[in-house]
Amino acid sequence: MKETIVTIMITFLALTSCAKSEKAVPIVSLETPPPSKVTPVKIVILLDKSGSAPDHAVPQINVDDLQPLIGFLTTRGGELAIGEISSKVHRPLIRLRVDNVPPPPPIKPAPLGNAFRDADAAEDYRIRITSHQAETAKFNAEVDRIRDIFIRDVMPLAMQKAEAKKTDIWGALRQSDLFLMEAESATPIRRYLLLLTDGKDTAGGYPVAQLKSQPKMLLVNSSASDGVLARFDPLKFESFAAAVRFIIHDKNGGKDANKK
């Protein structure tokens, strides 16, 4: 009987000690960390398919060259569009849009020094990380599906010979500006217009005074020719890969055209 009473008293004191120690343990949030401040992007790439492009060392890209930009898009969300500069604008831009990029994974909680609370935290983390992994797997599967469609649609344009008899720079700019000006629920948005061209307009269309979307313009050719694009003071690159690296690492892509 005495042994039983002693055992009960020890158990009571142990529980009391645990309760006191639990009160002293700070409460640690197990919430998923807030998403990092990542700004979505809208990017237009215009490929010059006019006969003058080869004479001015304008590069012609293949679909593999687009993979870094596609990967960049899947980490930020937004839209990538591919178009052409030729005799006239005669078809819509080819688009790849990525929405609902998963948030960062939950942070694994640090030990609290209490077996009961650590066990609860570990279980909570297990549930959260399992859910995040499932969400990410679903997102990646959808990205793979739409990327394959995009690559299939872009391939004929990428392989098309540069032999158009005229170059309608102004028409291509208006089409790109319209795309970049489309209303978006997420603001701000980084906007880029990447042109692989010599900038020489021969179609005689009405000039564009300014781009309302106010994108950051990048011009790629190996002859340092900017033609009619000189008025926009584009950033100049000798290679497409260099221009892509700039976009990926840039901190300020154009202005927020939707900002009032």
Image: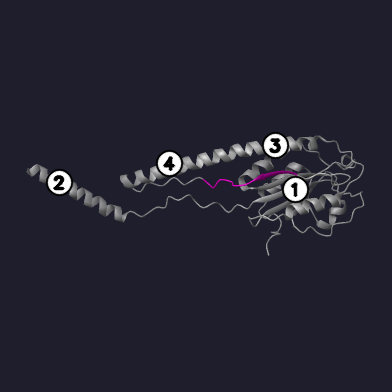
- Which marked residue is nearer to the observer: mark 1 or mark 3? 3
Q: How many marks?
A: 4
Which mark sits nearer the N-terminus, 4 or 2?
A: 2
* Residue at the disc numbered 4: 126
Which mark sits nearer the N-terminus, 3 or 2?
A: 2
Question: How far is the residue under mark 1 from the one under mark 2?
Answer: 75 Å
Q: Position of residue 176 (x, y in %)?
A: 78, 51
* Amino acid type, residue under disc 1 in the picture: Val
Magenta region, residue range: 94-104
What is the crowding at mark 3: few (fewer than 14 residues within 10 Å), some, or many (at least 20)? few
Q: Are marks 4 and 2 in contact (CB under 8 Å)?
A: no
* Amino acid type, residue under disc 4 in the picture: Arg
- Which colouring convention does the figure follow? one colour
Which is more toward the observer, 96 or 236? 96
Which mark sits nearer the N-terminus, 1 or 2?
A: 2
Q: Is residue 141 left or right of residue 115?
A: right
